[in-house]
Image (cartoon, coloured by chain):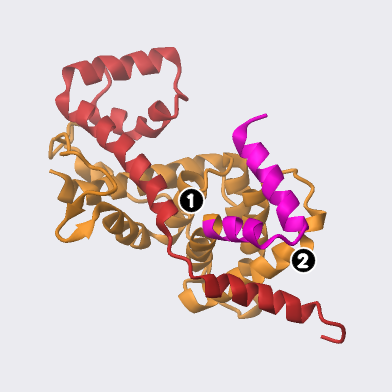
Amino acid sequence: MPDKIKTDASLLRGLIAGDRAAFETVYRQHNASMVRVASAILRNRASAEEITQETWIAVLRNIGGFEGRSSLAGWIFTILSNKAKTRVKRDGLSVSLDTSTNDDSMDDAFDGRGRWRDMPELWDEMTPDRVVDGRQVLAHVSAAIDQLPPAQRAVLVLRGQQELDAADVCEILGITDSNMRVLLHRARFSLRQSLDRIGR
Amino acid sequence: MLNCRDLAYQADAFLDGELSLWKKLQIRIHMSMCNGCSAFIDQMRSTRTLVKAEAQVADTADTEIDSILAVLHTKNQPGS
């Protein structure tokens, strides 16, 4: 049995039993990502935090009904996404996740013959602990993630950080697989550009 | 012949091991001749690692956890 599934099963038993330590583990694993995904859908940090808290309460109240058809994280993010979308409708918000992929920022990196305009160079050692301009590299990464367009940010968090199955990410965000891949690649490419400015 | 832009667009699929043997070979041949693309793939690999690491450092106060458990407890009280 893969470690991830074993961990899920163990946490699940703890959550059902009302074990605070199990809840704390799951909370620390997902809460910040949940706020980011909800913010991407709602475009409002305060509402995102509120929806995230409501999601945790729903998770704890309904954990006995979790059937394991997706991962525990997939189930939690599905609840979050449904609550956020309901809030968008309830409040008559005109915002929605703009998943268009008509963005040519990647193409700008190349000339007409498909060659790099600015040839990439190997970064000096880029470890999480490295300090650049008084900040750790991870602080730069955090800031860069928060500056991504909402749809790219949501996909990056769900797929690149939470490592949900591609199918679950598409279901949660209501996007196609090809759309998700393009958004994820653009997000990673943007972050690479941002890190490149401090990495040489 | 694969150019740098083609390679950049396939970098994620390459790192995820999702490309066919032929496409992987094309990328490896291009990388062997192009220091820029070789550095780019290395940068994308580092970027992915750093993005994952960033998710592990979220600061969470115990009070946040307590407040959720308190709300849940209140909602479970008879008559609430």
The x, y position of residue A170, in whole percent, is 59, 47
The x, y position of residue B51, in whole percent, is 37, 47
Mark 1 belongs to which subunit?
Answer: A
Secondary element at tag 1: helix
- Chain corresponding to orange in the figure: A
Secondary element at tag 2: helix
Q: What stretch of residues is rendered in magenta?
A: A1-28
Name the magenta segment's main secondary structure.
helix
The x, y position of residue A21, in whole percent, is 63, 59
Please name the amino acid that badge 2 sits on: Arg
The relative height of residue B1 versus residue B62 in the rendered view (above or below) is above
Q: CA distance from mark 1 to mark 2?
A: 27 Å
Q: Is residue B69 magenta?
A: no
The relative height of residue A20 versus residue A138 in the rendered view (above or below) is below
Dot label at residue A155: 1
Give the drawing colour for chain B. Answer: red
Residue at horizontal 58%, vertical 54%? A173
Q: Which residue is mark 2?
A: A61
Please name the amino acid that badge 1 sits on: Val
